[in-house]
Amino acid sequence: MKENINSDRKNCTQPVVPVRVFNDGVSPNRAGFILASDKKWANGTLLTFAFLEGNEGDKDVVRKAFKTWKDLGINLAFKEVTPSSDPTIRIGFDVRDGSWSYVGRDVLTISKNERTMNFGWRLTGDSYGMTTAIHEIGHTLGLQHEHQNPNAGILWNTPKVISYFSGPPNNWDRPTIDHNILNKLAPNSIQASNWDPDSIMHYSFDKGLIQAPEKYQSGVFPPGTLSPRDIDNIRKAYPPVIVAKVVRLSPNKSAVIKAASGDQNDFYFTAPLTRKYNFQTYGELDTVMVIFEKGPKQEYYLSGDDDSGVEKNSKIRLPCVKGRRYRINVRVLYSPGPDAGGIIVA
């Protein structure tokens, strides 16, 4: 990402969120699997977004950036709504605050009155605005900074990195430099592939900031567009649903969840009567379960529950209407083995 092509534009600065701590009953292996997937959305999720401010030119760039991701064929949907309709993604244009976004499902932990994404400079006028918008939306989809990939093998010239980023336009302090550049992501916190220096999620780095690999001593300058590996990784994270594999649920009849750690199973339920129903997983799985109702033109998010890292199962109680169809997506963050759990509606 060519962050340094214009001297008045800072780098993307990731918000600091609390490190997730597990209780003593969660094994390191289980914790690792949970951390590798817990920022991903359930496949098939509708993500609503709203602009809290900004001009139409900048908003149009962001809209086109959402479409760029959607046009890859990923199984997420994006819909612009008004700020008053409780959007999942809340976008600001505060020029005092740089450009940033929370990562994936971290946005759900943020107060409804706060932004989850911000753009700190104008997005119109050159291609860099689109690069910035695609990059920040990538974070919202669950992608981290690629230069912090633990498989990158980057050896930094730390004094030069500190000197460079502590000066204008970033003017970062040491903790910010560590958080956004020098610290590698924990290997068990991501499903990391080999390093992709062309990734849209990668900063540009000038000559002398990297000591190794040797070929990058002269700098790293990603093209500012989605790389082939970006496209492949996001399609693997949010693949199309195979309709034939979607399982129909009936009241009081359980169904096995067959997904392995990091994968997902999809179910649907047509309510035979109008009443409240309990949707519940069981067994030894760590899951995120979300439920949508099928409407005439689109599906509507109803509720979700995350049971990962605790000794309970996902459970959602909802009023359902006779004859209406509901989609239940269960992303498995950790499974100890085949057929380790299931789901039931009662």
Image (tube, rainbow, N blue to C red):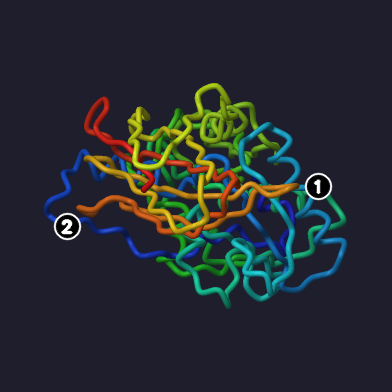
Check residue 154 in the rendering and tell me which mark sits there, or answer none: none
Dot in front, 2 or 1: 2
Mark 2 lies on residue: 23
Q: Is residue 328 left or right of residue 225?
A: left
Whether residue 114 is visible, yes or no, is yes
Give how far across and how far down residue 250 sits, in percent.
43, 37
Mark 1 lies on residue: 127
Q: Is residue 316 left or right of residue 270?
A: left
In the rendered image of this protein, does residue 59 appear above or below residue 192?
Answer: below
Q: Quadrant of the N terminus?
A: top right
Callout 2: helix, strand or loop?
loop
Whether residue 205 is visible, yes or no, is no
Return the residue nearer the eye: 58 or 308: 308
Q: Amino acid at mark 2?
A: Asn
Q: Amino acid at mark 1?
A: Ser
Q: Residue at x 59, y 58 (%)?
A: 12
In the rendered image of this protein, does residue 305 appear above or below residue 200?
Answer: below
Give how far across and how far down residue 31 sits, in percent.
25, 45
Q: Residue at x 22, y 33 (%)?
A: 336
Crowd rating for badge 1 (residues with CA inside 10 Å; few <14, some 14–19, many 20+): few
Return the residue nearer the eye: 142 or 151: 142
Callout 1: helix, strand or loop?
helix
